[in-house]
Amino acid sequence: MSCLKDGKVAIVTGSSRGLGAAVVRELAAHGCNVAINYFQSKDAAEALHKEVSANGVSAIVVPADVKRLEECKRLVDAAMEEFGHVDILVNNAGVNRDRTLRRMTAEEWEEVIATDLNSVYYCTSLVVPQMIERNWGRVINMASIVGQMGNVGQSNYAAAKAGMVGFTRAAAQELARYNITVNALCPGFIETDMVLNLTEEVKQALLARIPIGRFGRPEEVARLCRFLVAEGEYITGAQLNINGGMYLQ
Ligand code: NAP
């Protein structure tokens, strides 16, 4: 029996759309109770809530801007109030504000660092004390191939994602003794709004660089996430590539 059926509870940040929504579907399909978090896409989050609740798991929807510590606290408090504990945290919320260095504004830099990186510290530090008490936890950080290989016009995003990997390694070492694993997923280019909104020219140029010859699917990333959570008790501090062979290390 999957350990997820054992009344486990997951918070997935930024789960109204894209990879986060796919992770919610996958964890819920395996019996996990979930806290769905949205920032702006309320209707999508509520539709997802309805969908997964129909599968017999408990779910809540919590609006929270993860750039803000107090809103992360509200998210974690809401999950604790509803479920009594949080076993799994998927730090997934992210934005990109692509611009070459000559044109990037400080606001664009700060928004990406705050959303993609500061939130990882905020949410993780808020859930970890009760994971330590329960001697079990799983933290998954949604990093990116871009944090590994860099990309023109994405210095803010690459810095945030590489920062998540450093955070993952340090936190994994710190928390291993409490049976808490911390890992980073490094997806390549996956079919979500973030990629589908690129121009056709950029998409074709990217496809030409992917040996498997297609973009990834959100469900493929979600399955890897579920594997780490449910079966990955001896995997910690890792960065797992899921990129169709686009970047190998
Ligand atoms: P997406 O389709 O653009 O969805 C982004 C999600 O993040 C949405 O649910 C959005 O919520 C949420 N979000 C954005 N800002 C937020 C904030 N301040 N507070 C709370 N939630 C916020 O992106 P995606 O492709 O699913 O990406 C998900 C994660 O995977 C990101 O961290 C991204 O960097 C990473 N990633 C994506 C790819 C890819 O190819 N797609 C590759 C590597 C890594 P609302 O809509 O409710 O505002």
Image: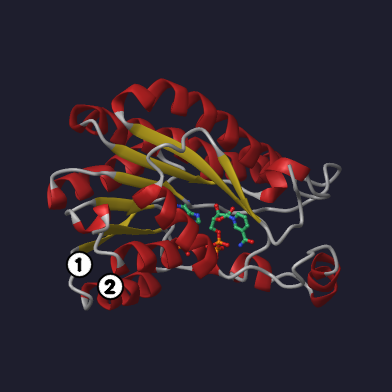
57 to 148, vertically: above or below: below
Q: Do the CB atoms of the residues marked 2 and 1 lie less than 8 Å apart?
A: yes
Residue 57 disc label = 1
Neighbours of disc 1 within 10 Å: few (<14), some (14-19), many (20+): some
229 to 56, vertically: above or below: above
- Residue at position x 22%, y 49% in the image: 79
Would residue 155 be visible to someone looking at this image?
no
Neighbours of disc 2 within 10 Å: few (<14), some (14-19), many (20+): many
Q: Which is more toward the observer, 210 or 38? A: 210
Give the side of residue 153 with respect to residue 159, left or right. Answer: right
74 to 213, vertically: above or below: above
Give the side of residue 228 with respect to residue 61, left or right. Answer: right
Q: CA distance from mark 2 to mark 1?
A: 7 Å
- Residue at position x 53%, y 42% in the image: 184
Residue 52 disc label = 2
| Amino acid of disc 2 | Val
Q: Position of residue 142 (x, y in %)?
A: 53, 49
